Amino acid sequence: MYSPAHDCSVKVNALTDLHACRQCPRLATFLQAIKNHHPDYHAQPVEAFGDRTAKLLIVGLAPGMHGANRTGRPFTGDYAGILLYQTLHKFGLATHAESVSAQDDLQLLGCRITNAVKCLPPDNKPVLQEIKQCNTFLEAELNEFIQSGGMAILALGTVAHQAVLMALQRKPGLYRFAHGAVHELNADSGLKLYDSYHCSRYNTQTKRLTTEMFEQVFTHIVKDLRNPSS
């Protein structure tokens, strides 16, 4: 049975320090350079977005250069968010099919979105030490999610999948990433980890991930949430 590795209040308090985090020198330097060239960009760690009592937590890789890094909201303002928010809306998990900015009136319903790495990495490729450093924040988010009755975690891509397992202190060899895979993390509570290819421009344009494939994952998740004993 999963239990937080540390006192939950300490971990939740860690989230209050996210905005000011500069623990990864490479990322901090990169964000400062972006801020100098684009003063109107968020160019800071990006916080989670959505329902704090969500049953579904979606974990992506990291903010996109002209998406979350610009707007300050996960998957907002770039191509990757198009399929995600359309799908969330179709399955009744979002009030609109598009996320325009952090100031719009979009609300997520029973759903919350975050990233494994909170800052934009160069070439969208965080190094292992950055993933580990940021895992403190993901662990805090997962603690809060589970404590609030969360049931389903959707990992978008291998890095997100591995980051979730790291945060929950699970052995990665027992939970192999595969699109459409479902991993039981806690038989008593029903907590499950679902895998999908990331909804990036590359994956969708190359058809590695199609709309139908992505919707099939959500069909499975929604069905399980409605029938947790199944």
Image (cartoon, rainbow, N blue to C red):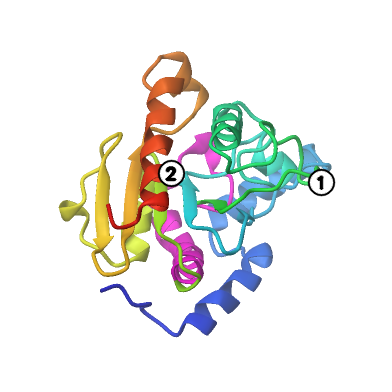
Instruction: Classify mark 2: helix, strand or loop.
Output: helix
Q: Position of residue 67 (x, y in %)?
A: 66, 36
**Residue contact at pointers 2 and 1, CB within 8 angstroms:** no
Q: Which residue is mark 1?
A: 103
**Identity of the amino acid at label 2?**
Val
Label of residue 3 in the image: none
Q: Main secondary structure of the magenta part?
A: helix
| Crowding near the residue tagged with mark 1, few <14, some 14–19, many ≥20 C-alpha atoms within 10 Å | few
User: Is residue 126 found left or right of 118 in the rendered image?
Assistant: left
Is residue 130 on the magenta stretch?
Answer: yes
Q: Which residues are magenta?
A: 117-146
**Identity of the amino acid at label 1?**
Gln
Q: Which residue is mark 2?
A: 222
User: Is residue 126 found left or right of 66 in the rendered image?
Assistant: left
The residue closer to the viewer here, 118 or 121, is: 118
User: Looking at this rendering, what residue extends furthest in the top direction?
Assistant: 206
User: Looking at this rendering, what residue extends furthest in the left direction?
Assistant: 174
The residue closer to the viewer here, 122 or 201, is: 201
Q: Position of residue 209 (x, y in %)?
A: 40, 23
Q: Is residue 158 visible?
A: no
